[in-house]
Image: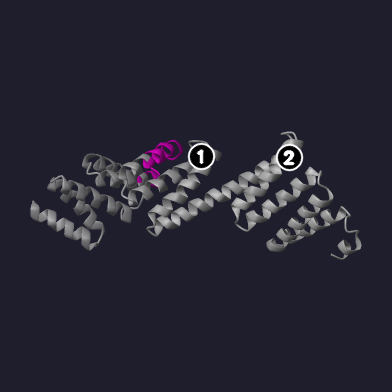
Amino acid sequence: NLILKDLLLDHCDRISIKNNIGTIHFTNGNYVEALKCYKQALELNRLLMPNDSITSSMILNNIGHVYNELGNYLQSIKYHRKAFRIQKKFSTKNDIEFATTFNNLGVAYSCLRDTFNNIGEIYLSNGHSYEARINLEKALEIRLKSLPTDHPTLSASYSNLGCAYDRMGNSGKAIEYHKKSLDISLKSMPKNHPDLATTYNNMAECYSELDDLALALFYHKKTLKIRLKSLSNDHPDIINSYSNIGSLYTDEQKYKLALKYLKKAISKSSSATITKNYWLVYVLI
């Protein structure tokens, strides 16, 4: 600041000094002060060097970095885009500045999509299905623009959206998203991966809600098959699978088969609900 006072008001070194002070603040984690300095440098650049596109694009990128660190990803994208538009006019696609700005935009978009997804998952876990769907769809929209169509991250997005639609009572739409998730997972995961079992289980629950007991049973059995190979014998998910299959056989009035699976569930669990279901079926036989 002492150096700044010693320079003439219109001296162009003021821009560089302000920008450098901003970078020092940024490096030290003082993002609010960094933002203040960078914006002052940008304003000085506008007043003193209006035709200097290289410096302005550099400062714009710096501001974008600060907003990214502050978690304001939309603002980060805004400033990186401004830098990109300037560089597009004066740079070739092979220029390092051009490549850097592309990377900056990629990082900002990545943070933004992760933020939308994280917010969506929080809403989902708290039972706010509508808000979850809105945020998860925003995350998916960004991911579809930046990732290959068979990227595993897209599988997670489709799965989350499937769960959101299921909790909203739209089982048909939920199945569509779970199938998309499954298509990707089958290409990228081992055939006995627990996440595949989770997807099969989600689909089974949706078909059960649609009273398609045959498909519900089919997917619950696929779930159980994977869980038996990938989890310990007394894992709660295995107990749930036995119980789910037993309940479906009860609904189909196949009581001996229902008793078989409920007996396996009850042997591994002290759940009052499973015990009650077992004895209800036992009485029916």
Q: Position of residue 202 (x, y in %)?
A: 33, 47
Verify whether residue 194 appears in magenta: yes
* Amino acid carrying mark 2 in the image: Gln
Verify whether residue 76 appears in magenta: no
Task: Tell me the tag on residue 87.
Answer: 2
Using the rendered view, name the quadrant where residue 15 is placed.
bottom right
Report the magenta residues as a range. Answer: 177-197
Q: Is residue 129 left or right of residue 64?
A: left
Task: Tell me the tag on residue 144.
Answer: 1
Main structural element of the magenta stretch: helix, strand or loop?
A: helix
Q: Secondary structure at mark 2?
A: helix
Q: Position of residue 207 (x, y in %)?
A: 27, 43
- Between 4 and 120, which is closer to the camera in this rendering? 4
* Amino acid carrying mark 1 in the image: Leu
Classed neighbour count for the residue bearing mark 1: other residues with Cα under 10 Å, few (<14), some (14–19), many (≥20): some
Image point 50% across, 47% down: which residue? 139
Q: Is residue 54 left or right of residue 256?
A: right
- Between 175 and 217, which is closer to the camera in this rendering? 175
